[in-house]
Amino acid sequence: MSNGNNCIMVGIDLHDNSMLLALGINAGDPTYVSFETDSVGRQRMIEMLKAHAARHDATVHVVYEASGNGFLLYDELVQAGFTCHVLAPSKIPRSATCARRPTARTPCCC
């Protein structure tokens, strides 16, 4: 992996059958890409991230919320040479606006 001067930040919204990636290069606007969560989809995602890293001479940092999918994705991303962080949803700070909206009818979008 590149140890370049640029940084690609990747946030993954991980679901049982799909994952939506938001990719930001340095301070640029994000782009969105979707992949399936099966082994073929995960490998395609990793190859795409490697290509972006090479093209932009960048390091890749990935973050996603812990889920029932376990740490398989984490293991694959780290093995590919990326920095990866898995966040515990209960440990993510909520804004004051979200704290005032605790019902399912008004979910927090913050």
Image (cartoon, rainbow, N blue to C red):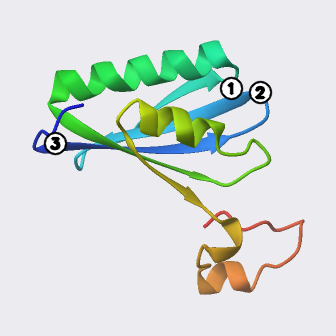
- In the rendered structure, the answer to whether residue 70 lies left or right of residue 96 reads right
The answer to whether the residues at label 2 and label 1 have Cβ atoms under 8 Å apart is yes
Q: Position of residue 90 (x, y in %)?
A: 71, 73
- Can you identify the residue that label 1 sits on? 37
Check the image and report above or below for 87 versus 41.
below
- Can you identify the residue that label 3 sits on? 6
Q: Position of residue 7 (x, y in %)?
A: 23, 45
Q: Quick one: SS at disc 3?
A: strand
Q: Quick one: SS at disc 2?
A: loop
Task: Residue type at mark 1: give it.
Answer: Thr
Q: Quick one: SS at disc 1?
A: loop
- Measure the alpha-carbon separation of dots 3 and 2: 31 Å
Task: Residue type at mark 3: give it.
Answer: Asn
- In the rendered structure, the answer to whether residue 109 lies left or right of residue 34 reads right
Residue 28 image-quadrant placement = top left
- In the rendered structure, the answer to whether residue 106 lies left or right of residue 31 reads right
Task: Residue type at mark 2: give it.
Answer: Asn
- Can you identify the residue that label 2 sits on? 17
Please tell me which residue is depicted at 70% across the width and 20% down the height of the picture. 38
Question: Which sits in the foreground, 48 or 84?
Answer: 84
